[in-house]
Amino acid sequence: MEISILYIFFSFCLFSIMGWILEVSYRSLCARRFVNPGFLKGPYLILYGTGSLMLMGCILLFNFYDVNFVVKIFTYFIAITGLELISGLIGTGLFNIRLWDYSDQFLHYKGHVCLKFSVYWVLLAFGFEYFMLLPYQNFFTSIPDGFKILSTAMLSSIIAIDFIGAVLKNIVSPKSLEEKEIIEFEFINMAGSLLENSALRALSQFDHHRGKTRLEHVREVAYLSFQWGRRLSLDGNAIVRGALLHDLFYYDWLHEGPRFHGFRHHNIALKNAHKVTCLSKKEEDIIKKHMWPLTVVPPFYMESLIVSVIDTFCSARDYIDFKGHKGTRKPIAVVDNSGLREERV
Ligand SMILES: [Fe+2]
Ligand SMILES: [Fe+2]
């Protein structure tokens, strides 16, 4: 049977829902109460959708029906356990969520995978191959294309929105008060000296986005980028310093400044930043590439990419979520930034 984009998306949605039903039944029976697994709001588990696609890939693309039984067991074991391990590591490392915990099981790795459940998954994979795949393919070909397209479009959009919302919620905000305090402490330690610098404080005199001064903007970008970087074990110091200096220019970009501000202000900020402090190669790259892809040359470091993405996210949020922001503060002190005057082009 031909594997089309529609087949892939339809299968992903359907098996994500079926996986949720299976997992809810198992967990609720074990706990003797209703348990809703996963970190998404809706009734689907994308891990099952992804796992099913992986199995279909093995079976249909590599013609697994003819493959040696032992090779099959080994492949299913590695593929599904690997998927479970990567998902577990992403959950705890990136989202700070532990979706399952096998710590009390025999032969486990950091609670993410264990022998018993890996054996279960292999049995399930064989069940999928021998009892489910063929009826599913017949079912898929029997339903009208219009229904498949409509239901796939609806379900994938819902899952995508749910997923993006969960990612933003879990990455942008720290999970516990204690963790939040630790992150803020580390951030202030790294950002403190720059935040006290008059050249940076002068940014409070300029509106940047709706309802926000430039100082508030760079601080926000630095803080959120630092959180991302921390979870990905990146260079937090470079992220904080680069992000704080990424918009170091002194004009109202909406009404004055150079033409094509979006394409030029990263160079102005970089020149100004060099006058404020010594910059590492990484910090230079963060400032220079923060407008990527407008700057064409892609970020050289992961830290630069993070700041660029967070800068775009914060800017978009400032305009979309205007109601949630306080009004722009007017300057409360005259800051001496005469040394940077020539950069106000
Ligand atoms: Fe910028
Ligand atoms: Fe910015």
Image: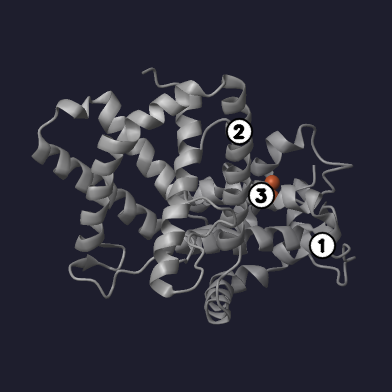
Q: Residue at x 86, y 43 (%)?
A: 254
Q: Position of residue 126 (x, y in %)?
A: 23, 42
The three-letter amino acid code for the residue at tag 3 is Phe
Tag 2 or tag 1, which sits nearer the N-term? 2
Residue 313 is tagged as 3
Q: CA distance from mark 1 to mark 3?
A: 15 Å
Identify the colour scheme used: one colour
Along the horizontal axis of the image, is 158 left or right of 316? Answer: left
Q: Amino acid at mark 2?
A: Ser
Residue denoted by label 1? 324
Question: x and y percent of residue 304 in the render?
Answer: 52, 48
User: Is residue 9 shown left or right of residue 327?
Assistant: left
Q: Residues within 10 Å of mark 1 (few under 14, many from 20)?
A: few
Contact check, label 3 and label 2, Cβ < 8 Å: no
Q: Looking at numbered disc 1 in the image, what kind of residue is underneath it? A: Gly
In the picture of the structure, the residue carrying the numbered disc 2 is: 151
Give the spatial CA distance, label 1 vs label 2: 35 Å
Which comes before the other along the chain, label 3 or label 2? 2
What is the residue that sits farthest to the top in this orientation? 2
- For residue 190, what is the image quadrant? bottom right
Left or right position of 205 against 221: right
Image quadrant occupied by the N terminus = top left
252 vs 224, nearest the viewer: 224
Q: Residues within 10 Å of mark 3 (few under 14, many from 20)?
A: few
Q: Where is 262 relative to 218, above or below? A: above
